Amino acid sequence: MSAEFLTILGSTGSIGEQTLQTLKLLPGEWCVNFLTTNSRIDILERQAREFKPQGVAIADADAYRQFKKNTSFKGEILCGNEGIAAVAADSKNTILVSALVGFAGAMPTLAAIRAGYVRRIALANKESLVSAGCIIMPEARKKQIEILPIDSEHSAILQCLRGEDYEEVEKIILTASGGPFRERPAETFGAIRPEDALRHPTWNMGAKITIDSSTLMNKGFEVIEAFWLFDFPPEKIDVIIHPQSIVHSLVQFRDGSMKAQLGAPDMRVPIAHALAYPSHVTSDFPRLNLLENHELKFYAPDYDKFPCLRHAYYCLEKGGTYSAVLNAANEIAAQLFLENKIRFTDIPRLISEAVEPHNSIENPSIEDITEIDSATREIILKTEAR
Ligand code: NAD
Ligand code: MG
């Protein structure tokens, strides 16, 4: 077996770091080709020393200059969005881990597909599918590049669907922890502070996805992600609240049979599976002990309390560029909330105000999507600054 050359977009983030932790478990020889960060050059420096990549790319210009001045790293050092896109498209890459956060992940992911060297993209960056799934998926299919999910729910669905006839699937059911405010009365949501929302009950993740989990926007994005990855219509994609995060998702077949994938909540499991697919690697990750008083509970989602989930279904049904607006509006709203500039309840409101008047483009180009993304951000920032 020839060596795999791995590039990780967003190697300094939560998924990026955990990806590097799984490398020693993977069968065969793995070479780290490029690592990238926005501005966490301290972490990048440590990773470069340990994994000796061919090069690194740093999006932020100041961080790039600082790194270049102080580092002992001898490999290539690239800068800016162009640098990130260039390493994604590098001709040596066989596997790309797409783990940037937000729409910033869409262009480099697409650059890798268009360059056509990678065999597989292990995708954590769900926002790129939410905004630009209509471009990314068909282009990847045309180039025969596999897009495999890192997201735990989609990894579960992938495993449940293995060897099955998609025609026999009645629906897929994505589980959601429900976030930290599942039981909190909706009347008190206006008083939620960023630090409350950053306390996720079962997963330890980057700040943006933790906020998205608390609003259930993350689950809405995952519905759209499932649509693009598995090609089921919205009415065949359900969401169910499961606070324990033990059942990672389920598939229901036309005879009433259901398959589920279970495990301790640990992102290294789906990461390693996406890299080694179809293999399950040997690991010492924590085992789920079913005898340890594991009560599995399931509840219907409350769409009135968490309108972001409804917004996601709405945008998916409408198609075109609606989901690009959804993503951009959420990205800015989540950021403003984290900066204490708006209230928690303003997040779904701002999204709805952006989505409502949208003039959608059918069959958009990536340029159309990028333009809509920027325009949506600008409008929200302008209205909120007033
Ligand atoms: P994170 O904030 O911990 O890391 C994000 C990474 O992207 C960092 O390396 C950062 O330097 C880089 N980055 C951020 N903005 C950038 C920009 N503009 N240009 C270039 N690089 C940039 O985020 P995370 O929790 O690792 O999440 C990454 C992605 O994976 C997200 O799309 C998230 O929804 C998805 N995801 C995460 C988890 C999880 O457990 N963390 C689970 C499922 C899916
Ligand atoms: Mg998930």
Image (cartoon, rainbow, N blue to C red):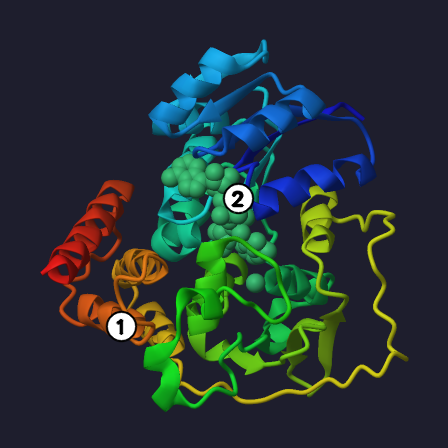
Q: Amino acid at mark 2?
A: Ala
> Residue at the spot x=41%, y=69% of the render?
217
Q: What is the quadrant of the N terminus in the image?
A: top right
The answer to whether mark 1 is within 8 Å of ligand 1 is no
Q: Position of residue 382 (x, y in %)?
A: 12, 55
Does the residue tagged 2 have its C-beta within 8 Å of any atom of ligand 1?
Answer: yes
Q: Is residue 261 left or right of residue 57?
A: right
Marker disc for residue 186: none
340 displayed left or right of 282? left
The image shows residue 290 at horizontal and vertical percentages of 86, 77
In contact (CB < 8 Å): disc 1 and disc 2: no
Residue drawn at x 36%, y 47% is 103
As drawn, the label of residue 346 is 1
The image shows residue 132 at horizontal and vertical percentages of 36, 50
Instruction: Name the one closer to the observer, 242 or 114.
Output: 242
Question: In the drawing, what numbered circle is on residue 99?
Answer: 2
Query: Residue reaching furthest left?
Result: 386
Residue 125 against residue 8 in the figure, above or below: below
In terms of sequence position, does the residue under pointer 1 or pointer 2 come before the other?
A: 2
The answer to whether residue 205 shows anywhere in this view is: yes
Q: Which residue is rendered at x = 49% and y = 34% of the image?
A: 40
Total numbered labels placed on residues in the image = 2
Looking at the rendered structure, the kind of residue marked 1 is Asp
Of the pair 363 and 347, the residue shown nearer to us = 347
Q: Indicate the position of residue 139 as horizontal and vertical percent values.
A: 43, 42
Q: Residues within 10 Å of mark 1 (few under 14, many from 20)?
A: some
